[in-house]
Amino acid sequence: MTPQERERLTGVGNGYAACGADFEGTVRMVADARRLEPAEVKQRLAETRMRYGTEAEFVRLRRRLPAESPP
């Protein structure tokens, strides 16, 4: 994973853990912090999953989010 992809996925996981918010609320919070649209955050997370979905680091970071949340 690139440093930006790692930071994004870590940020979503941190936001979700800190706020206990639903996934959509967490995505909005991350999008606001990075001056992106929520759809952009989701798209970038989906792209990261497509590239690294089976790698141990991705799996470890992704486990911090609810299994049913996309991506």
Image (tube, rainbow, N blue to C red):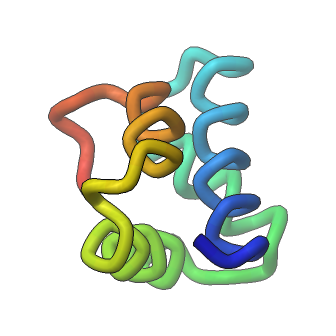
Q: Position of residue 68 (x, y in %)?
A: 16, 34
Q: Is residue 56 left or right of residue 6?
A: left
Q: Is residue 1 left or right of residue 33?
A: left
Front position in the image: 46 or 38: 46
Residue 60 image offset from top left, x and y in percent = 47, 33
Reply above or below: 9 against 19. Answer: below
Tally the marks. 0
Look at the picture and state if 63 lies above or below 3: above
Q: Nearer the viewer, residue 19 or 54?
A: 54
Which residue is at a point 32% across and 66% down the rendered structure image? 49
Could one spot residue 22 in this view of the protein? Answer: no
Quadrant position of residue 63:
top left
The answer to whether 42 appears left or right of 6 in the picture is left
Residue at screen point 59% across, 54% down? 9
The residue shown at (53%, 24%) is 21
Quarter the C terminus occupies: bottom left
Q: Is residue 66 above or below residue 51?
A: above
Q: Is residue 30 visible?
A: yes
Task: Quarter of the image for the N terminus: give it.
Answer: bottom right
List x then y, in percent, for residue 28. 58, 57
Residue farthest toward the left in the current orientation of the protein: 68
Residue in view at x 45 percent, y 50 percent: 58
Closer-to-camera residue (49/39): 49
